[in-house]
Image (cartoon, rainbow, N blue to C red):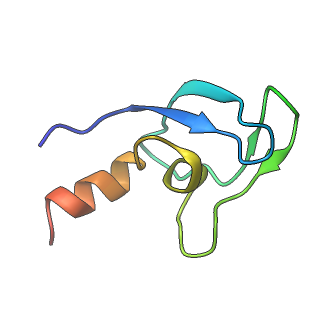
Amino acid sequence: MTTIFESVLTCPHCGFTQREVMPTDTCQFFYACPGCHALLRPKQGDCCVFCSFGSVPCPSIQQQRCCPP
């Protein structure tokens, strides 16, 4: 399975969407919505904002799902 490196983040406050390139070497804990400027944080149990609000989970989670240790 191929890892996807872009995700569309959707702000839960205003619904604004933005395509972003996900970091491959770290989790992104904060994201400032360009629409309403709300500071997004991961939901409890998620590792990053992409896993909580993105159309695709972050690369590290994708790799865990497709390639279990």
- Which quarter of the figure is the N terminus placed in? top left
Q: Is residue 14 above or below residue 60?
A: above
Provide residue 29's location: percent of width, then percent of height.
66, 54
Tell me: 67 left or right of 48: left
Q: Is residue 50 above or below residue 16?
A: below
Q: Residue at x 24, y 39 (%)?
A: 3
Image label count: 0
Q: Residue at x 64, y 66 (%)?
A: 43
Provide residue 9's location: percent of width, then percent of height.
58, 37
Provide residue 45's location: percent of width, then percent of height.
54, 75
Provide residue 27's location: percent of width, then percent of height.
54, 53
Q: Residue at x 35, y 58 (%)?
A: 61
Tell me: 12 left or right of 17: right
Extreme-right residue of the structure: 37
- Which quarter of the figure is the C terminus placed in? bottom left
Q: Is residue 20 above or below residue 12?
A: above
Q: Residue at x 14, y 60 (%)?
A: 67
Tell me: 21 left or right of 65: right
Q: Is residue 34 above or below residue 43?
A: above
| Camera-side residue of 15 and 29 | 15
Tell me: 7 left or right of 43: left
| Camera-side residue of 25 and 11 | 11
